[in-house]
Image (cartoon, helix red, strand yellow):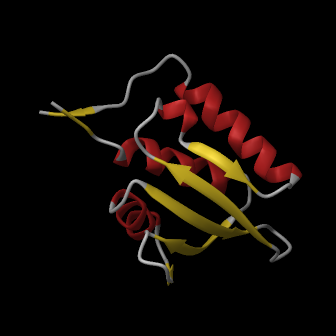
Amino acid sequence: MKNNWKPVIKSFFAIALNRGFTLYTVDNGGGEDVLVNSIKEAVEEVAATDESHVVLKDPTGKRVWFYLVLGNEPYETICNYSVHDLADKVQEEFSDKWEDKRCPQIA
């Protein structure tokens, strides 16, 4: 069986958007930022590679980045992020949601 990272990635975006962030760009490893307009599109871009830089906009329009790495435990997916109070809350909620949980599997 193979890990299915899409539910993990989707939960990151759902938490971030619920906290007031809006989608902006994803670098899916190709070296260029791809504008994303939906969670589905953002999930596909992040899932296309093992590591991604995601840029979201906070409620004031400030750009905030998250560095996502797939392959460790799900709660460790957010490896680094901008110094930002709202980003701290996203990371905490995401880690709490996935702590002690395995990555979903594809049969």
Left or right of 56, for residue 36: left
Q: Residue at coordinates 36% horizontally, 44% vertically from top-left? A: 5
Left or right of 1, for residue 44: right
Q: In the figure, 75 relative to 49: above or below?
A: above
> Residue most toward the left?
107
The quarter of the displayed image where residue 25 is located: bottom right
Percent position of residue 36, x then y: 49, 77
> Residue most toward the top?
100
Task: Look at the image and tell me in which quarter the C terminus lies.
Answer: top left
The quarter of the displayed image where residue 70 is located: top left
Task: Look at the image and tell me in which quarter the N terminus lies.
Answer: top left
Left or right of 98, for residue 22: right
Left or right of 53, for residue 9: left
Percent position of residue 104, x then y: 31, 31
Q: Residue at coordinates 39% horizontally, 70% vertically from top-left? A: 41
The quarter of the displayed image where residue 7 is located: top left
Q: Residue at coordinates 46% horizontally, 64% vertically from top-left? A: 39
Q: Front-most of 74 and 19?
A: 74
Q: In the figure, 52 relative to 5: above or below?
A: below
Q: Front-most of 72 and 57?
A: 72
Q: Residue at coordinates 68% horizontally, 49% vertically from top-left? A: 80
